[in-house]
Amino acid sequence: MTIALILPQPPAYSETFFRSKIEGLIVNGHQLILVTAATDKTFDLCVHIQHPKVYKNPIRQLLSMLLVFVGLLPYWTKVNRYIKLERKEGTSFKRLVEKIYINASLLKLNADWIHFGFATMALDRETVPKAIGAKLAVSFRGYDIEVFPLKNRDCYQKLWAYVDKVHSISNYLLEKAFDLGLSKSVNSKVIYPAVDFDFIKKIQFSSDTWGVKLKLLTIARLHWIKGIDDLIETAQHLKSKQIDFEWKVIGEGDQKHTERYAYHIYKAGLQEQVLLLGKLSHAETLEELSKTELYVQTSLSEGFSNAVLEAQALGKLCLAFDAGALSENIQNNTTGFLSPKGRPHLLAQKIIEVEQLSRQEKEQISQKAIQRVRDHFSLEEQAKSFSEFYTT
């Protein structure tokens, strides 16, 4: 079976979700084709093709379009089907010409499935799979389902009409997609993210992190949906209780958000307690995670959260707002702790309570978290689930 996976760019070595998915499908006998935007980056696991580049220079763009259209002549049957489908959808002639250009690489494919790795990647490409005789699959992630539709109402109605099967990284996102108009009759499957334990073993971890100063860590984009304001307010509550702590935040944001959160930390007098580390590599992030005592996720919504999953895999005690799919990620009071969303004073209280647990109680929760991740979120389990996704 030939599967074309559509992504914005080739997955980096540290992006275990897509790399492990591709590796698993290849091992199970499928042929994979990766399709991305035009890029200088290369990919080593399978055939990699790119969408035509869009140029700002109109003359260069016109020449590129002529070359692309000439290259499509041997595929006229597929192109003609695509034109008929788009005209049926009411696409104007000008927009149709543009769409033939941006979808040229896909129109040349011989594939059984075209799988869009993000729902937003399927926009303006909804009819392509049918035109080339392939099935359309799409994956749901947090931004696609929770953020993008806020400013783009009814953006997926055309996609819902053409999709054959959907993959979601959580039950929560699947239910949100139903609220956005996806029919419950569409074939769907939840396949959770997975943890690469072999990669984790390569990192040198600290053996005992509990000390006089409480060490906390959060991995998140500097964005309102990640609850960074609530994080800072939680830190204020901890400081007011005379807790000696250090709270590192790994992640970046645009300049506006970064400056606002830095100013918020300054105004709260938390410069020595809350440290914005910016973006780190996956290996550097895991090393920081190994040094922490408590992992805290203050997101106001999460499609699932790989960071929380990896923290549990490392046996870190995890606390999070009970938001989005985090209740599917953490088993409350068993593998970690959930606190009411958007209530920083209660989160601070829970942090103090967890910090005061006995070493034996902490170890029990840590071991349960590690075991649950091994049992239910392994790369092997993920590869098996994806292979079944295309054949059942």
Image (cartoon, grey):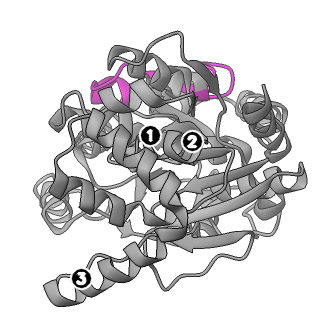
- Which type of secondary structure does the marked residue at label 2 adopt? helix
Q: Position of residue 358 (x, y in %)?
A: 69, 30
Residue occupied by mark 2: 308
Identify whether 181 is placed above or below 168.
above
In front: label 3 or label 1 = 3
Task: Tell me the crowding category of disc 3: few under 14, some 14 to 19, or many 20 or more residues within 10 angstroms, Cα based.
Answer: few
Residue occupied by mark 3: 61
- Which type of secondary structure does the marked residue at label 3 adopt? helix
As measured in the structure, the alpha-carbon distance from the residue carrying label 2 to the one carrying label 1 is 7 Å
- Per the rendering, the mark at residue 51 is none
The structure residue drawn at horizontal position 67% and vertical position 41%, both measured from the top left corner, is: 312
Which kind of residue does numbered mark 3 sit on? Answer: Gln
Q: Position of residue 244 (x, y in %)?
A: 41, 51
Task: Give whichever of discs 3 and 1 has the lower sequence position.
Answer: 3
Give, as a single range, the part of the protein colored magenta.
Answer: 329-349
The structure residue drawn at horizontal position 70% and vertical position 33%, both measured from the top left corner, is: 362
- Per the rendering, the mark at residue 297 is 1
In front of the other: 45 or 15: 45
Image quarter (top left, top right, bottom left or bottom right) of the C terminus: top right
Residue 31, located in which quarter of the rendered image?
bottom right
Task: Find out whether residue 361 is within the magenta segment.
Answer: no
